Amino acid sequence: MAEATLTRDDVLEVLKSVYDPEIPINVVDLGLIYDVQVNDGDVYVQMTLTFPGCGMGPQIAQQAEWAIQDLEGVEDVQIELVFDPPWSPDLISPDARQQLGI
């Protein structure tokens, strides 16, 4: 049986289980995920926060790392928090906008 190949979509799907504790929307639909790269079992995620001083940032990044590590085939996970470009509500997905009533 062939080994399952880890994809960018697999990573994005599992990241939908990670939430900003202050907003009931997952980090993908909030637009906090800027980049996902998968190279064999190595996963790199570039993400941001709703604002740079967010005290929950380290916790959100840790939750993202743990979620990705649970995927089959993952060897190493690197989460990079970036603030350029800054996050804006324009990045929220249409479904999440509807959920938030905006």
Image (cartoon, grey):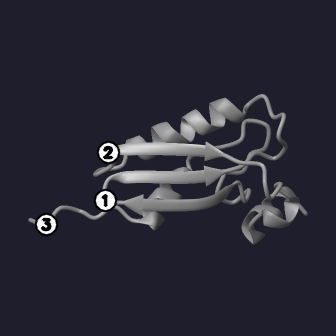
Pick the residue in front: 42 or 21. 42
Q: Earlier in the sequence, mark 2 or mark 3?
A: 3
The amino acid at mark 2 is Glu
Cα distance in 3D space between marks 2 and 3: 18 Å
Quadrant in which the C terminus is drawn: bottom right
Residue 40 as seen in the image, left or right of residue 31: left
Q: Which residue is at 72% across, 51% downward? A: 25
- Residue at the spot x=44%, y=44% of the render? 77
Q: CA distance from mark 2 to mark 1?
A: 8 Å
Q: Residue at x 32, y 45 (%)?
A: 75
Q: Position of residue 40 (x, y in %)?
A: 31, 59
* Location of mark 2 (residue): 75
The residue tagged 3 is 2
Q: Which residue is mark 1?
A: 40
Of mark 1 and mark 3, the one earlier in the sequence is: 3
Q: Secondary structure at mark 2?
A: loop
Which element carries disc 3, helix, strand or loop? loop
Residue in the foreground of this view, choosing between 14 and 75: 75
Q: Amino acid at mark 3?
A: Ala
Q: Is residue 28 left or right of residue 6?
A: right
Q: Quadrant of the image for the N terminus?
A: bottom left
What's the amino acid at mark 1? Asp
Q: Residue furthest bottom?
A: 94
